[in-house]
Amino acid sequence: MLAYAVIVLLVLTVIILILKIVSMRHGTRDIRTQLSQKLSIDTNTLISLSSNDSELNKLADTINKELKVLRGLRRKYQSGDRELKEAITNMSHDLRTPLTAILGYIELIKNEENEEQRQKYIGYIENRALALKTLTQELFSYSLISSQSEPDMQQVNLCVSLEDAVAGLYGAFIERGIEPEISMPEDGVFRCLDPKAVSRILGNILNNALKYSDGDLKIELTSSGKMTFMNTAYGLDKVQVGRLFDRFYTVESAKNSTGLGLSIAKMLTEKLGGKIWAEYSGNVLSICVEFGE
């Protein structure tokens, strides 16, 4: 009787093991088939199992987590690929335009005998050459900043940095009929930042105001470390404003620009632990930068 019971127990154990093995084979086959499908098409669906085996379900959960990461990387790559293609197209156009103009004026100079007209053409060439220089400098700056190591943090008075940045471009603003209005605390606003990076951030934002402003510029620095640059900018919309920090993005009113200025400002601001964003309301464009304590 005991021997019979042992035999029955062994048979049941074997049957259970066979069922377990069959279930695992079905489960692993499901995982293999579904994983192959998920990798071949762009889908948000995840691997699902009918098996109740806890280890197989844990394996499926782990694979699903990796699939989510992989999809994020794929979308990031696809977005970067599209952005790069757009950038190459835009840059080709932006670089070709001044080069074509320069070559055209050179041909005109060759056949022009009037000295006054020749000097006029030389002036046009110089203007186009400067535009080309600006474009290449922005590209170089972006490449350099992208590969830079940790910032050199020092005690910085944001009031002084802001005054210096505005003074450096004051002549350009006056030439455009813009009188900057600045409001800031008298006691100064001190933060531990990289002074060169802060100077670049402010310079790029002010240059952006030169491109977009329709005749005014108001700058406000608060004791909390928030700087707001406000100027009237007709013709923009919230979609354009939302893309102002995108690499290589420009709107039609921004001529001779790679669209890297605000992208560089954003990169540097975030490296310094700050925040930067844009707002647009009532035809007023506001670029806000904040360095908390």
Image (cartoon, rainbow, N blue to C red):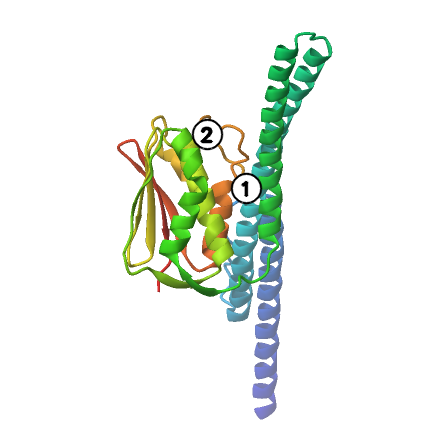
Task: Kindly identify the residue that appears in the image at 47 percent across and 29 percent down.
Answer: 254
**Mark 2: few/some/many CA within 10 Å (<14, 14-19, 20+):** some
Q: Is residue 89 visible?
A: no
**The image quarter in which residue 280 lies:** top left
| Residue under numbered circle 2 | 251
Rendered location of residue 177, percent (x, y): 36, 29
Q: Which mark is residue 106?
A: none
In this picture, is 216 found above or below 72? above
Outermost front residue:
115
Q: Is residue 79 visible?
A: yes
- Closest to the observer: 36 or 125? 125
Task: Kindly identify the residue that appears in the image at 43 percent across and 36 percent down.
Answer: 171
Horizontal side of 154 relative to 127 (left or right) equals: left
Under circle 1, the secondary element is helix
Outermost bottom residue:
2
Q: Amino acid at mark 1?
A: Ser
Q: Whole-Å distance between the Cαs marked 2 and 1?
A: 20 Å
Rendered location of residue 17, percent (x, y): 60, 74
Horizontal side of 110 relative to 119 (left or right) equals: right
**Mark 1: few/some/many CA within 10 Å (<14, 14-19, 20+):** few
Looking at the rendered image, the quarter that the C terminus falls into is bottom left
Q: Upstream in the sequence, badge 2 or badge 1?
A: 1
Q: Nearer the viewer, mark 2 or mark 1?
A: 2
Q: Amino acid at mark 2?
A: Val
| Residue under numbered circle 1 | 79
Mark 2 vs 1: CB contact within 8 A = no
Task: Kindly identify the residue that appears in the image at 49 percent across and 65 percent down.
Answer: 153
Rendered location of residue 198, percent (x, y): 46, 54
- Closest to the observer: 102 or 57? 102
